[in-house]
Amino acid sequence: MIRQEEVYRIGRLGKPHGVKGELSFQFSDDVFDRVDADFLVLEIDGILVPFFMEAYRSRSSEVALVKFADVDTEEQARELTGCSVYFPREHAEADTENASWPEIIGYAVVDAGTGQTVGRIADVDTSTVNTLFAVQTDAGGECLIPASDELVTGVDKAARTLTMTIPDGLLSLD
């Protein structure tokens, strides 16, 4: 059985495309294209289920058409419409050069100056020009930290940590 902590969300399935089981797939992370993986994980009625990909082709930078094994009709594809799509963390960790925003959700943020854990990344806000990490602190609060390349000093995929130089006074803001 696949556990939630073993995967991370990369998108959602849209409506069927054609009559042979192809589906539109809106994704926020193209890790399935960068890393060698034969399957994606779909959430169906709260259960994570692997689906093997027969083929996929890009429509844009955020949409692909995907064909899963044993999904051969428009009706079968329609049953999967709206499913959240996840990717296995162990496969994503094989890509040591890249870490996407969705992949780092759940990572611990470590202050490079003190070596202490600030909290865990609960969300990445990309709605403005300045991307922010929403960090759930160990004390139960939340703080926003700029997701700037200049502040990130290290990423350890195996330990699931992001080491950052936290600007002075940022953590004491209410």
Image: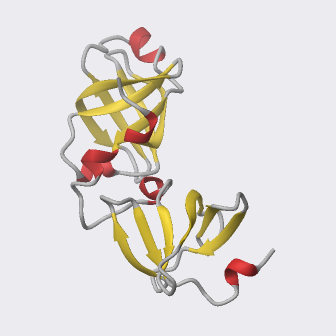
Task: Name the residue located 47 percent from the left edge and 16 percent from the top edge.
Answer: 78
Q: Is residue 144 left or right of residue 102?
A: right
Which quarter of the figure has residue 121? bottom right
Residue 144 visible at all:
yes
Say whether residue 129 is visible: no
Quadrant where the image shows the C terminus: bottom right
- Is residue 123 rendered to the left or right of residue 100? right
- Most foreground residue, 161 or 16: 161
Q: Position of residue 50 (x, y in %)?
A: 32, 25
Which residue does the image show at 34% across and 18% down from the upper left? 21
**In terms of depth relative to the viewer, which is nearer, 22 or 94?**
94
Q: Nearer the viewer, residue 28 or 168?
A: 168
Disc count in the image? 0
Relative to 36, say whether 21 is above or below. Answer: above
Please name whichever residue, 89 or 86, is drawn nearer the observer in this view of the structure: 89
Q: Position of residue 71 (x, y in %)?
A: 31, 15
Residue 55: image location, x then y, percent: 23, 32
Task: Give residue 124's quadrant in the image.
Answer: bottom right
